[in-house]
Image (cartoon, rainbow, N blue to C red):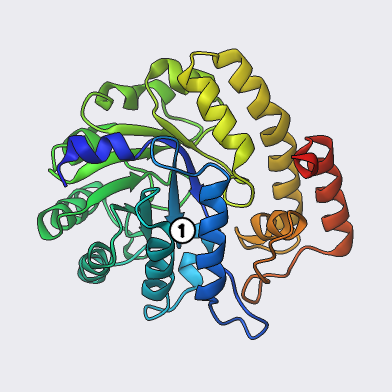
């Protein structure tokens, strides 16, 4: 699929969905197939959202190489073309990334989210060669994930200017970090989509972002789809207020509970369970939320009116 066609698909609430595990921590592909239908019924549809599989919040780094293809296939099959499906490739070398990108294409994903090969301690030139090799090897959309908080994960604007020249680069998931200019990436918005990975959605939208990420959209989509509708309608202040009501306390809660036990999927899985669709525990050594943490999270969600929807 050509870049411009893909850019029309990669928009809206980008929902990183949790990976369900059974009691023995095996991937439950049947469970995620069921969940996919539910997420679509709740608003994750083409033009409003993207479902992203096996990213960090979906415990992608914890999956074996022979596990994530079945997971991705289950989601694609259940979606039946009603929402774009993106697979995530996390911190792999060029050879494995190309192999897995080809698998994602064969399984029906429209794009892959790819962060720099962090485990290779890449230079900016390494990062440029990495994305160039991926684009040349596989005819699938590529979402570049800037990781400014990770060692060697930041992609400088000078490098991004070159990366977007590669044919299959369709989007940049953008978080500038503490010492970079938030606005600089938007000079590339006429070439690729900018997905806002920050807390200021209204600012990003004014500058040209076409989608956003969140902690909670993979557990309960409706509030995030409504925020996207507000952004699309130009009701930016209203959208930001709705976002702040949920995102600020949720980030504080996330920071607090992950300081006790790590694992990016813990909060999303706790939220899913509260919404009546448990996805199992995270894989060890990450712990599930404690009863006290679950009670606090439930109180927050009740306050937002989610349990009344």
Identify the residue at image location x=23%, y=62%. Answer: 105
Q: Compared with residue 186, is residue 198 higher up or lower down, i.e. above or below?
A: below
* SS at mark 1 in the image: loop
Coordinates of residue 29 in the picture (x, y in percent): 50, 74
In the rendered image, which quarter is residue 244 located in? Answer: top right
Q: Which residue is mark 1?
A: 55
Q: Residue furthest bottom?
A: 24
Task: Give the mark count.
Answer: 1
The answer to whether residue 139 is left or right of residue 13 is left
Coordinates of residue 108 in the picture (x, y in percent): 28, 61
Identify the residue at image location x=58%, y=70%. Answer: 20
Q: Viewer-proximal residue, 88 or 14? A: 14
> Residue 211, can we see it?
yes
Identify the residue at image location x=74%, y=40%. Answer: 309
Q: Compared with residue 282, is residue 138 higher up or lower down, i.e. above or below?
A: above
Q: Residue furthest left?
A: 136
Q: Compared with residue 161, is residue 136 higher up or lower down, i.e. above or below?
A: below
> Residue 156, can we see it?
no
């Amino acid at each position: 699929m050509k870049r411009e066609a893909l850019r029309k698909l990669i928009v809206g609430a980008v929902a990183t969905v949790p990976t369900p595990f059974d009691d023995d921590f095996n991937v439950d592909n049947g469970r995620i197939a069921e969940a996919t239908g539910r997420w679509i019924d709740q608003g994750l549809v083409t033009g409003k959202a993207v479902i992203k599989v096996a990213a960090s919040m979906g415990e992608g780094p914890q999956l074996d190489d022979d596990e994530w293809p079945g997971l991705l296939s289950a989601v694609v099959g259940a979606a039946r073309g009603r929402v774009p499906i993106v697979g995530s490739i996390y911190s792999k070398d060029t050879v494995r990334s190309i192999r897995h990108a080809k698998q994602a294409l064969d399984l029906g994903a429209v794009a892959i989210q790819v962060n720099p090969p962090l485990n290779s301690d890449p230079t900016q030139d390494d990062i440029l060669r990495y994305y160039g090799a991926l684009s040349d090897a596989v005819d699938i959309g590529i979402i570049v994930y800037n990781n400014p908080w990770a060692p060697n994960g930041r992609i400088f604007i000078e490098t991004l200017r070159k990366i977007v020249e590669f044919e299959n680069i369709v989007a940049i998931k953008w978080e500038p970090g503490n010492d970079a200019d938030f606005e600089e990436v938007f000079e590339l918005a006429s070439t690729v989509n900018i997905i806002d990975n920050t807390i200021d959605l209204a600012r990003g939208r004014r500058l040209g972002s076409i989608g956003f990420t969140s902690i909670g959209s993979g557990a309960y989509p409706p509030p995030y789809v409504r925020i996207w509708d507000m952004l699309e309608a130009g009701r930016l202040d209203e959208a930001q207020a709705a976002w702040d009501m949920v995102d600020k306390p949720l980030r504080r809660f996330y920071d607090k509970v992950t300081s006790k036990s790590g694992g990016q999927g813990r909060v999303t899985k706790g939220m899913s369970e509260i919404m009546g669709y448990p996805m199992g525990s995270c894989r060890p050594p990450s712990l599930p939320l404690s009863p006290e943490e679950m009670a606090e999270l439930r109180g927050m969600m009740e306050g937002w009116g989610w349990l009344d929807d």
